[in-house]
Image: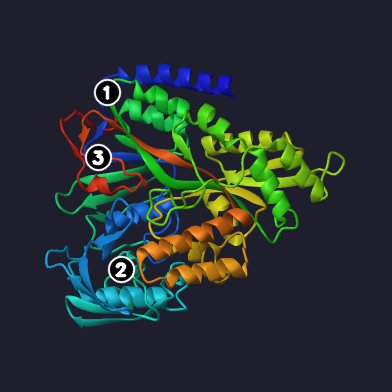
Amino acid sequence: MRERIGIIVWFAGVLFMGLATTGCQRQPADGAIRFGVPNLPENFDPRFASDAISSRVNRLLYARLVDFDSAWRPVPALATWTRLGPRHYRFHLKPKRRDFSNGDRLTSADVVATYRSILDENSGSPHRIALGNVRALRALDIDTLDLLLKRPDPLAPALLVHGILPARLLAEGHDFRARPVGSGPFALEPGADSSQVSLRRRADDLRLRFVRVADPLVRVMKLGHGEIDLLQNDLPPELVGWLASRPGLSMQRAAGGNFSYLGFNLDDEATGDPRVRRAIASAIDREAVRHYLFQDHVRLASGLLPPEHWAGYRGAAGFQYDPALARRLLADAGYDDEHPLHLVYKTSSDPFRLRIATIIQAQLRGVGVDVDIASHDWGTFFGDIKAGRFQLYSLAWVGVNTPDIFRYVFHSESLPPHGANRGRLRDTRVDALIEQAERQPDMRSAAASYRRLQQRLLALLPYVPLWYEDQYAFTREDIAGYRVSRDGRFDALARVRRVKQAMPDHGR
């Protein structure tokens, strides 16, 4: 495998150097900045979007009342707030705020309408479960609204982090999935298709084009040729290291908080057995993967939230690489060389994700587990995971900011389509710990409760925590203003710019 990657890197070098010397950068005639991505957004409606690229792009299209600081504590975005009582918050919209992209003024009525839509049990929003403590939202005037809770919650402002939609269009049944109307720094340009999505920056009409390039090697080639200006993440580590030494490119890197994991279907006869899940955790040499595959640019994970998060788990994972233990656990579960365990491991068709799956497949084979890898295009793969059509899969949670993710992912009331409990975990103690954490009077008490919850999850292992991958981005030398975020968000695109002009490409 390493020889194959070495050949790929050599081939990339030959092509990159050849393309880089074939003349000026191929800048589009409209001056658009082109961002190479492996997948395009699936949904421009923040009430329903759940995949990473959609969530990141929607942050550019829609403004939200609340955002987060470096420790993931809620801070004002569109609005400030005052706590009037244990169950009562008052929000004040800032006077300086953008209108919606259709010209409508954003008011408290739009905020109320957006959240009432998410909370409507007939809407099918996957975010409804996280807002279960909301009793009511009431507009007092055009700039002021009240949030009323069912039970006290010192973290309640962190609930209001969804993009705001115009009430008038909500009432008309507007299709925001395909035609977004928000008050973010960008607006969607017409003409999106399966190859690209174009946004217009409202402050200066700069065009930003997300270009789908599924193959990472081709993305690298397009960056070298000037057919894209920027790419972020989703490259094999060898290509990352190689690109970092190329002239004419700028690289940024940040320690990331995106959580990679192995997920299990607990309704399956095999993966529903806790002995099998712990055996798989014990069979994976995470340290070797971190060092040899990622070249030490990941941190091993113990929980869904990183340790620097105010509610993050700061203890050990509770398992380590121990193939002998894995074999004993499998034997206890009834599996041995004569009766091996067979599993199907689902992943996307991304070459690097396939490579990780292949490594895990080999490590599991070392303890007698036969694994078939089933790779699919992103849409098919993610659809199967949401529908529960899997035994074992790998994915990552990206952009997670609040501990209400635990209710969304692990509470027994969050089975799809009501949440993202895709592994079908049903554990009364987990439910009780989630509910206990949500009732705590302050962040310190809540953090202690969430850490007890994470200890319980490590005992059950509905997920095997793998690692937090670093964030990195490459830009061409005439692109300035982009700053990579540790959660991978694209917000810095609101400030990105060209610092010198190149000859336009007129279709040569």
Mark toward the start of the polypeptide (3 vs 1): 1
Mark 2 closeness class: few <14, some 14–19, many ≥20 residues within 10 Å: many
Q: Which mark, by number, is residue 248?
A: 1
Identify which residue is drawn at 27% across, 49% down: 491
Q: Is residue 461 visible?
A: no
Q: Is residue 243 visible?
A: yes
Mark 1 closeness class: few <14, some 14–19, many ≥20 residues within 10 Å: few
- Of badges 3 and 1, nearer the viewer stands 3
Q: Could you tell whether 359 is left or right of 77 in the image?
A: right
Q: Which residue is mark 2?
A: 157
Q: Give the amino acid at mark 1.
A: Gly
Q: Could you tell whether 468 is left or right of 224 in the image?
A: right
Q: Give the amino acid at mark 2.
A: Pro
Between 117 and 26, which is closer to the camera in this rendering? 117
Mark toward the start of the polypeptide (2 vs 1): 2
Q: Give the amino acid at mark 3.
A: Tyr
Indicate the position of residue 368 as horizontal and vertical percent values: 77, 38
Indicate the position of residue 117 as horizontal and vertical percent values: 37, 76
Q: Which residue is mark 3?
A: 482
Q: Could you tell whether 347 is left or right of 267 in the image?
A: left
Q: Vertical placement of 488 versus 360: above or below?
A: below
Q: Secondary structure at mark 3?
A: loop
